[in-house]
Image (cartoon, rainbow, N blue to C red):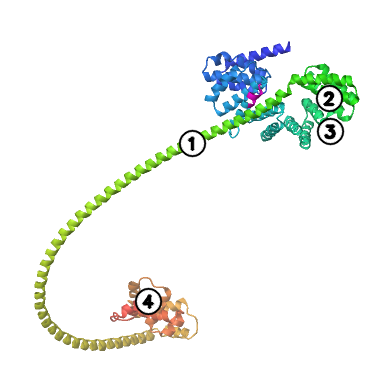
Amino acid sequence: MGKTAFRCLCALLAILFASCSKEGPLDKMEHIKMVGNDHPKQALAMLDSLEQEARRGSVYAQKKYDLLHIRLSDKANILPKSDAKIKELVEYFGKKGSDQEKQEVYYYAGSVYRDLQDCPRALEYFYKSTDFAIGHPDCDSIMLRNTYSNLNFLQYRVQNYKEALAMSKEELRISKELGTEDVVDHMHVGAAYKATGNAKEAVKEYDKAFHIADTTKDQSAYQESYIRLLMDYSGLGELKKAQRCRPLIKEELNPYFSVLKDQALAHYYMACGKRDSAIIYSQRIIDNGKDQNNMYDAAKQLFRLYEEQGDVVNAHRYAVLYMQLSDTLDFGRRQEQAATLTNAYKYHMDQKKEMELRDEKEMYARTLFVSIFVFTLLGAGGAIVFIHRRNVHLRKMLELSERIEQMAHNEQELRKEMERKEVELRESKEDLALTKKDLVNTQAELDKANDKLTIHAATLQETEKMLAEKIKEGKMFLQLLHQSKLEESSEDVALRFRKAALGGEELTSDDWDQLYHAVDQAYPSFAEALLGKSGEVTKQQKQACYLLRFGMSKNQIQCLTHASRATIWRWEKKYAWALGVEEPLPGEEEEGGTAGE
């Protein structure tokens, strides 16, 4: 009742999904695909409700629907009945599909042939699936891991243990990269090592598998792993490790696990030396009669046990059963299949290499064509450049020829012009000779005039020198006269400043004001003349000028103003025109200005 209700609920959800969604069939199928990763049966119910819509769509949508149906059926452990549908999908996606779609369709083709017990073709398609996954960054890594798991199963089944070991290692490597490393990955590697006779490496892998199962919270999910670890540890003689697995196995198990458990316990008791218990559990497998592989192992073990005990009757009985099961399982055919699988794999690799060589040949042909095309273009371009340069060169030659003709014409004109200039030059030379005679006469007259001027200049220079001496004597006289006049009118002021110059009392501002007043009374225009022509005058310059006008010596002025001797000298030259009565002598004003600067 509960299962029926669940199926109805799934169907209802699928109908609601199909009716309410506004997405196209491809988007819906992608959603169903995600649901099918964890709930394949529910996803199949949803996909069935989408069949009519998908069949009305494009051919691509129909093929995607069929491929998804095979994928979900495989995940739900629904065995295929034929390979008709997968053949169509392989043909379609093999020609028009992307690399991801080719990986997927070849993987599920391998799964279909695996379930149909066609190992050679299953192996061929699984290897093709890896071709479109290895080296492709967009491949489905989980599917690639499952591909290696299936390859390991097929190679182990036909006793090609060396290749099974290689596939199990690849499965473990990808699981580690994906972060999904689990017990099963190490169990596959350990079983392959055990089958190849490398017991030491097998035990290492089994230890890793036991550690992962032992450290998980839900140990009930690893019942099959514990049973197989018990059997494998016992077969390798690792009894202490087998004893750790024994109490972790539940008593109540489903029928498949019960048979597997009986086989594991038979191996365990055989390793412990408890032959009676081993016989009991082996007999239970024979009595169950459902799994021929386990019955084959149990019959083989019972034959050995009874033979060791000397029980000829039972030994003969189980020997006959052992041979019957051997014929039924047809191990000779399995070894033949192993050879077939190896040859198929070699053929697949040869085909792959042949395709690579063909692709390489086509690439070289394309490269040669492109090279010829490029060289042709370069040749044509070179010819065009050559013709263009030749035309440019010819144009330059024509331009040079025209320029040479023009230069020849200009040369003739220039020669005619030179002849005219030579005639003019001869005429000019004659005129120049006449002019030279006139110049010689004029030069003689000029020499006579220069002699007279030289005499007059010497006389004038002596006169100017005498006049300058007279003016200087007049100035000195006027200065002495003014000084005596000032001293008479301002005798107290003169006496105070002389004492100060000798190092006496310090002068006050009143003393300076009295000095300015005395000079201004004696020379009313002095202050105006000093400021009018000089512009701004500093206090120190003003003091020095008034002291000079008052008749003080340079040493006295230096002591009173604290200015340097050179500065006093420059100021005297600069303001000499203002200190005198008349305008300065010619050259004195220029010399005074230069010194001041």
**Does the magenta segment cover residue 427?**
no
Residue 362 appears in the figure: yes
Question: 33 or 123, which lies in front?
Answer: 123
Q: Amino acid at mark 2?
A: Gln
C-alpha span from label 3 to label 4: 124 Å
Name the residue carrying label 4.
596
Q: Amino acid at mark 3?
A: Gly
Q: Which of labels 4 and 1 is toward the front?
A: 1
Q: Secondary structure at mark 3?
A: loop
Sequence-earlier tag: 1 or 2: 2
Question: 294 or 325, which lies in front?
Answer: 325
Q: Report the residue at 66% width, 15% height from top.
A: 10
Sequence-earlier tag: 4 or 2: 2
Q: Is residue 529 left or right of residue 319?
A: left
Q: Secondary structure at mark 2?
A: helix
Badge 2: residue crowd in 10 Å (few <14, some 14–19, many ≥20): many
Q: Which mark is residue 363?
A: 1
C-alpha span from label 2 to label 3: 16 Å
Sequence-earlier tag: 2 or 3: 3
Residue 285 appears in the figure: no
Name the residue carrying label 2.
301
Q: Report the residue at 75% width, 19% height from top.
A: 328
Q: Are circles 2 and 3 on residues that touch, CB within 8 Å?
A: no
User: What x and y, as percent, mark residue 298?
Assistant: 82, 22
- Give the quadrant of the C terminus: bottom left
Write the start and end of the magenta stretch as one range: 118-123
Q: Secondary structure at mark 4?
A: helix
Q: Which mark is residue 237?
A: 3
